[in-house]
Amino acid sequence: MIVDKRFLVPLLGFMLLVAVLALGFKLRDPHLLPSQMLNRSLPAFSLPRLGDPSKTWSEKDLYGKVSLLNVWATWCPSCVQEHPQLMRISREEDISVFGINYNDDTAKALAWLQRYGNPFQLNIADHDGQLAIDLGVYGAPETFLVDAKGVIRYRHVGVVDEHVWADIFAPMIAELNRQAGGS
Amino acid sequence: MQIFRYLLVFVLMSGPAANAAIDAYVFPSKDLRVRYYDLIEQLRCPQCLNTNLAGSDAMIAQDLRREVHRMILEGQTDAEILQFMHHRYGDFVLYKPRFNYSTWVLWLAPGMVFCVAMAGCIVMVRRRQGQRSVSLSDPDRQRLDQLLKDKA
């Protein structure tokens, strides 16, 4: 069968379009939104401490040292998966680990920490998702790398496992500490 | 035919479910309520790939609807509320994205494709007009006459 070659042009164009779009989906998970918060200061907040609602935490309590700010919840299965790594980081690494207990129930959250261990130096009870919205959070777990002055340097959506730690967080933290030491 | 009855029930029941969000938010005036529904229609749920705040039951969509309601009651303008969302969730959250360096392709591509297609059409038409004026060479004309005569 002889086909006029010109008729192949639209077909090739269409195949090219499909290839570009497929590649776009493959290279970048469409669920991951680019963070708006990079290089911005932590939003101001004043929220109850988990398990001690008479007192509050504010953004200033997170200053002073490079820290991880981890958004977690008992309804989030991936948080259980991530938890051992947070335990290891808080034990072995020279970094503060802070928690935002996101849209959760205090009793459940405390029982969860009792059961799995508590890697957090402090835990913010964000049970209306107020701080989470100000941080542009849309799920859990999410982890922010915050420098000593309270500026957000990196945001990771999803589980921080050993690879994420070794490939992304550890080098960035080393760099932040080097800059802080140099200046 | 039993299956059709089940299907009918399913179809009738899935109508309301498609518009999942049912919050009992109270507004002091109809205008504010209209603005609220307008805003949650045009804001995209950050967790869902293609659902607006109005149509999503995701936790973040519920929280953001509550924020929209709060800000409307506080007297903020639509522009301020959209800015609030854009500041936190970026272009993704706006179903009508702003024109900037990362969205210009999105905005201009249809126009550019149209221009290219028009240019292609014009070129093709011109070329065909040129072909029409080509006349047969003398030997070809004699052959054509011969063929027509044979046929007759």
Image: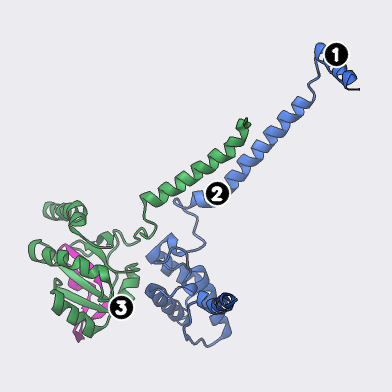
Q: Are discs 3 and 1 both within one chain?
A: no
Chain under label 2? B
Residue B39 on the magenta span = no
| Amino acid type indicated by mark 3 | Asn
Q: Is residue A166 visible?
A: yes
Q: Give the dominant element type of the magenta stretch: helix, strand or loop.
A: strand
Task: Between label 1 and label 2, give the one nearer the viewer.
Answer: 1
Question: What number is the disc on residue A103?
Answer: 3
Image: A138 above or below A32: below
According to the image, label 2 marks what residue? B108
Q: Residue at x 42, y 66 (%)?
A: B48
- In front here: A28 or A94? A28
Q: Quadrant of the N terminus of chain B?
A: bottom right
Q: Colour of chain A?
A: green
Q: Are discs 1 and 2 both within one chain?
A: yes
Separation (CA) of disc 3 from disc 1: 90 Å
According to the image, label 1 marks what residue? B142
Q: Which chain is blue?
A: B
Secondary structure under tag 1 reads helix
Secondary structure under tag 3 reads loop
Q: Residue at x 41, y 61 (%)?
A: B90
Where does the magenta region start and end?
Answer: A46-72
Separation (CA) of disc 2 from disc 3: 41 Å
The residue carrying pointer 2 sits among few (fewer than 14), some (14 to 19) or many (20 or more) residues within 10 Å by Cα, namely: few
Is there CB contact under 8 Å for labels 2 and 3? no
Q: Given the current orientation, which residue lies at the most extreme front position?
A: B1
Q: Quadrant of residue A149?
A: bottom left
Question: What number is the disc on residue B48?
Answer: none
Task: Between label 2 and label 3, give the one nearer the viewer.
Answer: 3
